[in-house]
């Protein structure tokens, strides 16, 4: 049977994949997990199963190929497994706990964790990040239950374990979870120099005006390149016990219209949560701004600030170029900084390093 490094080398040789030393360096870790899981699955009735292999916490900058490697790994593991975005998984956990409470369960998390462990031997998470106090308080007990049940966890993240939930409320209560992950998972930094997500945008405009049918078609084309043609699916952010739905989300790429993000009464916390969850935002149909939509314009300024500070790549369609979006009315002078940031964010090498 071919090992994962051998399969990868074959795909590189036939041109399916691109050679990348940093990516190739992590393949032995994936092979270790695959072989360990296979050994457990192949045990006989008379022989005790070997212990589950340690999982893997793979972190590194945006666009380095973490998600591609995860897909490659999961595709070549032949046993009950699940590949899911971390935020989506936590939403399912919250829903399961809510149902358990309605049934009168004293410990709402226990039956949910037991159900997950019953269904899979391998959980593969994409984009692990903890921004919500509720998630921070749940995730430690959840992972401990999964580890104790023999579930192997593999996850990607843009930040090292010690930076998870950084500066969060009551973070000291979260620290035992970080220690647990380091004990049960190998931590590996994917430190390659190539940002493949930026490569997929190389030579492509990222700001389209006017926001017409042609601009929409160009945005569709970019969505296809960034997501591998994935069908858009909604994604829910949990912000201060509220739910904020992003209409289209896949593998760190979010897509919404101006009205969906700025026409609703959202605030800085919502935009910060979006900037933390997404590495690319595709924002469509930004209108001319002024007196008639002053509140929406203020929200747009807040959104751009959040994206800018977080290094999120913005791809947009708008009624006018940045410096001509807001020409009259209160706030037009202050908008000059936003226009400048919008211009700066169009640079080919901007963002993607946070």
Image (spheres, grey):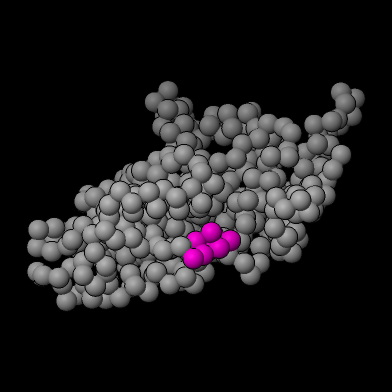
Position of 343 compared to 123: left or right? left
At horizontal 79% and vertical 47% (from top left) the residue drawn is: 7
Position of 62 compared to 18: left or right? left
Residue 236 at least partly seen: no
Q: Where is residue 121 drawn, in percent x and y?
A: 69, 35
Q: Where is residue 179 drawn, in percent x and y?
A: 63, 57
Figure quadrant of residue 215: bottom left
Residue 80 at least partly seen: yes
Q: Where is residue 51 drawn, in percent x and y?
A: 80, 40
71 shown above or below 290: above
Position of 233 compared to 323: left or right? right
Position of 166 compared to 43: left or right? left
Q: Nearer the viewer, residue 100 or 342?
A: 342
Figure quadrant of residue 117: top right
Q: Nearer the viewer, residue 97 or 311?
A: 311
Residue farthest front in this picture: 214
Residue segment shown in magenta: 196-203
Quadrant the N terminus occupies: top right
Magenta stretch: includes residue 164: no
230 shown above or below 311: above
Q: Where is residue 226 drawn, in percent x and y?
A: 50, 52
């Amino acid at each position: 049977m071919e090992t994962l490094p051998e399969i990868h080398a074959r795909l590189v040789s036939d041109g399916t994949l691109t050679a990348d030393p940093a990516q190739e360096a992590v393949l032995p870790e994936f092979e270790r997990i695959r072989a360990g899981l296979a050994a457990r699955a192949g045990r006989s009735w008379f022989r005790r199963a070997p212990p589950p292999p340690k999982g893997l916490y793979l972190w590194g900058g945006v666009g380095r190929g973490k998600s591609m490697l995860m897909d490659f790994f999961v595709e070549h593991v032949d046993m009950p497994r699940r590949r899911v975005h971390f935020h989506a998984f936590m939403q399912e956990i919250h829903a399961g706990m809510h149902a358990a409470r309605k049934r009168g369960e004293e410990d709402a998390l226990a039956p949910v964790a037991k159900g997950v462990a019953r269904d899979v031997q391998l959980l593969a998470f994409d984009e692990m990040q903890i921004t919500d106090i509720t998630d921070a308080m749940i995730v430690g007990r959840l992972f401990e239950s999964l580890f104790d049940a023999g579930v192997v966890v593999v996850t990607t993240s843009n930040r090292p374990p010690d930076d998870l939930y950084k500066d969060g409320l009551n973070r000291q209560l979260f620290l035992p979870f970080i220690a647990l992950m380091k004990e049960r998972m190998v931590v590996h930094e994917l430190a390659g120099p190539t940002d493949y997500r930026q490569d997929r945008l190389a030579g492509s405009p990222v700001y389209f005006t006017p926001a017409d049918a042609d601009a929409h078609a160009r945005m569709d084309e970019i969505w296809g390149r960034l997501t591998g043609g994935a069908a858009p699916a909604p994604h829910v952010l949990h912000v201060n016990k509220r739910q904020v739905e992003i209409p289209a989300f896949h593998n760190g790429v979010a897509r919404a219209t101006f009205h969906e993000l700025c026409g609703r009464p959202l605030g800085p916390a919502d935009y910060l949560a979006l900037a933390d969850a997404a590495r690319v935002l595709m924002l469509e149909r930004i209108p001319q701004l002024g007196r008639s939509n002053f509140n929406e314009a203020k929200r747009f300024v807040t959104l751009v600030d959040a994206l800018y500070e977080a290094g999120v790549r913005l791809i947009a369609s708008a009624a006018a170029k940045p410096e001509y979006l807001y020409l009259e009315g209160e706030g037009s002078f202050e908008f000059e900084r936003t226009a400048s940031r919008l211009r700066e964010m169009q640079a080919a090498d901007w963002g993607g390093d946070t």
